[in-house]
Structure formats: structure tokens, C-alpha cells
Image (cartoon, rainbow, N blue to C red):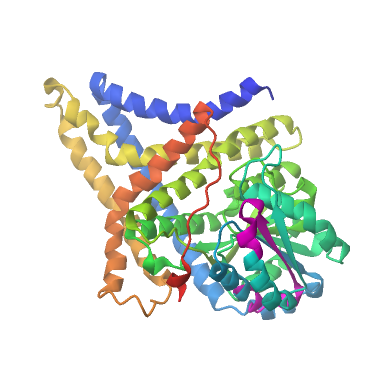
Amino acid sequence: MTRRAKRFLEILPGALLWSTLILSIVLSVVKPLWVVYFVIIFDLYWLLRILYFIPFLLTSWWRFRRALKTNWQAKARSLENYDRIRHIIFLPTYKEELAVVKETLRSLSEASYPSSRMAIVIAGEGRDEDNFKRILAQVEPEYASKFASFHATIHPAGLPDEIPGKGSNLNWAANQVIPKIIASGFDPDWTIVSSFDIDTIVHPQYFSCLTERYLSVPEPTRSSYQPVALYNNNLWESPAPVRVAMFGTTFWLMTELARPEGMMTFSSHSMSLRMLVDVGYWQKDIVSEDSRIFLQGLVRYHGEYRVTPIHLPVSMDTVSTGHYGKALVALYKQLRRWAWGVENFPYMIEKFVEDKQMPLRVKIGWTFKQLEGMYTWATAPLLITILGYLPFWVAPEQLRSYAIFQNTPFTLQWLMRLAMIGLFVSAGLALTLLPPRPRHYSRPYAFAIMSLQWLLLPVTFVLFGALPAIDAQTRLMLGKYLGFNVSPKRKAEEKK
């Protein structure tokens, strides 16, 4: 694909979103009736979308609750080839504190699945070498003997053809370690690789469930495995807007898990070593390595690649800085980084054009889903909360007597009231996912606060929904590519 064609694909998502926003403003003045009709249709579409998603969310929540009660280790052990399965867990880290690393290793070593069948790879950065070596010196003597093998790598700074970040760190670590692990007896067809953020605390039965799923699904090497991502490690200490945004992310992921035929991997997840070797490991010049590695598999196997849901949680940190305002800024940057997944769109189209074996229906399905998802992420919050009412503020006086102008505000109000069903469902489910309240969190009416925080949804919908997506898509459109920023995590004193 030529550079000009690639730039067109980089521009397309941003051009669609800015065309919508600009036309909404301009037409509100020159053709307000057009905008009124469009807003009614769009709000109706959004209501139907919410009503469509709620059953999937409830289904996924029910499967989640059922999975928590299942003895996955017993189920996995009863399956043929159980003894052949091995696990490799990659833990890239940069400027993390000792307590975060130790807690993650503790959760891995205490899992119901035998840690003696796990290989741990802690991947540090040369930019943080002294801190990394200090942490390694304290955790390796305590935890190395608990696993099949324990590896540490340091990703050199300034290597050519890469950007600093998680993807390039994983690429370096995999090239350094995986050949050694394979040589030690790990069979790529029977080895599962997990890529975890360093603050990931796994459910005790996660690797047992993952093993059971790998041994049960057809062609397990042609699938990635996605758990439920919870941001519970320090949830009680987080600002209310952060909690609402993180629960929103969890509910979006749970909805996707109920219809996995169109989903990509997100954040901490797992995959077969065979696929990872076949695609040449993670790419080192991108930010969104979690979804890109799925696309690499999808392209490598000509569309015959999928996500298998794991309805058990892995828990991670919310952004935390110790300062309310700084936490909101960090949240915005984290969500912008997630929205930077728009960088996958040009890659996906380029590979689809080159791939003559992938079915056309698969290409069309993925293209539509990605483009529609990016477009609504950036535009829906503004169209629903602000721009949808603009025609009624600026329309000329002669149009205000029209029945459509007099009735539409009430129609929109009723559509949004019906859409509040999604808000009540989210608030109710959020209470069931809360971690135990820490002893030091003595604020009265804590659970009432956790319920009332959902009144912030319209604000977070715009500030931490549309704006980060607009930011990311505009940067790609202008060729101002985003680097990888690390979200600040818990301080050591917060976890005592």
C-alpha cells in the first residue's frame, strides 16, 4: 500500500467525525429541520443500541457469577492432555513500585493451577534500569523457586524502528526468552501465553479456567482468551469519575464477551504460543499492542481467528496520583491511549487488501465494526447531550411554530428517559462487582455514594468518552502520532 493510501486511511476516521460535528453546527443554522430529523433518528438508534446491549450485559454478568462458583481446576484436571499444558506469563513493567510487583507475583504463585508449570517473564525498561534491578533483587529470591522458570529482561532504550512502550518491551522480551523456554521443553502447541499489565491480580482459578477452555474449544491455537477486566485493586480510593469510567469499560467488555464473534483482545489477556511465534511476536512500533496482536492473528490465519471468553476476573489498578485533579488528567490520558486503537484501522485495511484468502464477508464485517465503533465513540456523547439541542437554540423564529420544533424536545426527553434503563442496570451491577471495602475507608454511606456516582455519567460520557476519542482520531488525522504514556498506579502506602 502506498504512503498516500495509508494517509487516506489515517485521515478517514477523523474526517468522518469532524464532518459530523461541523455539519451539525452549520446545518443547525442553515437547515435546522434536517438536523432535527437526524437527531431524532440518531437518538432512537442509540436507544435501540442500549436496549440491544442490555441482554448481552446481563447474560455475561450471569456467566461471570456462575464461573466464580465453578471448580475450574477439577474440570481442567479431568481433561485429556491436561499434563501437557504449560503457561508463560509476561509482565512488562516501567517505574512500578515493589509492592505492585510483589502482589502480582503472589497472586500467580497462589493460583489453584500449579505454579510449577508457569514460566514468568518480568520485562523491565532500560530507561528505568536501576529501579528495575532493585525490585528484581528483592522479588527473585522470594518467588523464582515457585515457578518452572523465572526470567528477567531489560529492554534497551533507543532501538531503531520502534516506539518506547509496552509493545516494544514485549517484543524484545519475547525474542530474548521464548527460544530458551521452547528449548527447555515447552511445546508451542500446548503452551498458553498471557500478557498482563504488571498490576494484574488474577482470580485464583483463572489459569485453571484458561486451561480448561484451551483443552475444550476447537483449534485452541486459533484463539485468544479474554477475561473480565475489573479495576478493583484501588477502586475505593479512586475519584468518582474514575470509578464510573472504569466500570463503563468493564461493562463494555462484558457485553463484548457475550458476543465474541466481533471482539478483539483488550488489556490483560492470553493466547497460544503457536500463534505468537507464527506472527513474530508483538509489533514494536505501535501503542495498542493488546488489540493489534489479535489482528496479527486474524491476518495470519486469513480470518480464522477468534476470541474465547473467560468469565473470570483479572483485577487491575485505576489511575491514582493522590490528587483529585491529577487523577482526572491521568484518566483522560489513559482513555486517549485506549482510543488510540484507531491506529489499527489503517493496518487492518492494508492487510485485508493484501490478503486474497480471507473471505470478503469477514473483511466487511470487521471493517464496519471498527469504523462504526470509532465513529460512535467520538460523536454519540456530543450529539446526544449538546449538539442535538443546538437547532432549538439557534433556529429562526418562523420555524419555532412548527409542530416538529415544539414536539421534538419532549420526544428526545422520553428517548433519553428510556435510555436511562442502561444507567440503572449499570448502577445495580456495579454494586455486585465492588471489592470488599477497605478498613481505612470509613466514609459513611459508602454504598449510597457508589450508587449516586452514576449521576455523573452524562458528564463522564462527554469528558472521558467523546473527548479522548476525538483527540486520538484528530491526532491520527493530522499525522501527530501518539506515544505510549504509563498511567500512574497505587502508591505503596495506599495498599497497606
Residue 397 lies, with reference to residue 173, above or below; the image says: above
Residue drawn at x 38%, y 63% is 238
- Which residues lie in the magenta part? 107-133
92 w.r.t. 392: above or below? below
Residue 422 occupies quadrant = bottom left
Left or right, residue 36 beside residue 466:
left
The foreground one among 220 and 456 is 456
> In the rendering, at what x and y percent does residue 5 appear?
62, 22
Task: Please check the rendered image and state whether residue 122 is part of the magenta-colored stretch, yes or no.
Answer: yes
Looking at the image, which residue sits at the far top?
30
Expressed as whole percent of the image width and height from the top left, the position of residue 116 reads 75, 76
Q: Residue at x 34, y 75 (%)?
A: 441
Q: Residue 58 vs residue 392: left or right?
A: right
Q: For this view, does 432 lie left or right of residue 215?
A: left
Is any atom of residue 172 visible in this view?
Answer: yes
Q: Nearer the viewer, residue 151 or 393?
A: 151
> Is 332 a magenta residue?
no
Q: Residue at x 46, y 31 (%)?
A: 474
Q: Is residue 492 above or below residue 130?
A: below
- Which quadrant of the structure image shows residue 425? bottom left
> Where's the C terminus, which quadrant?
bottom left
* Residue in the foreground of this view, choosing between 321 and 361: 321
Percent across and percent down for residue 11 are 52, 27
The answer to whether residue 294 is visible is no
Q: Farthest residue in the front direction?
A: 130
Which residue appears at 70% of the width and 69% of the height? 211
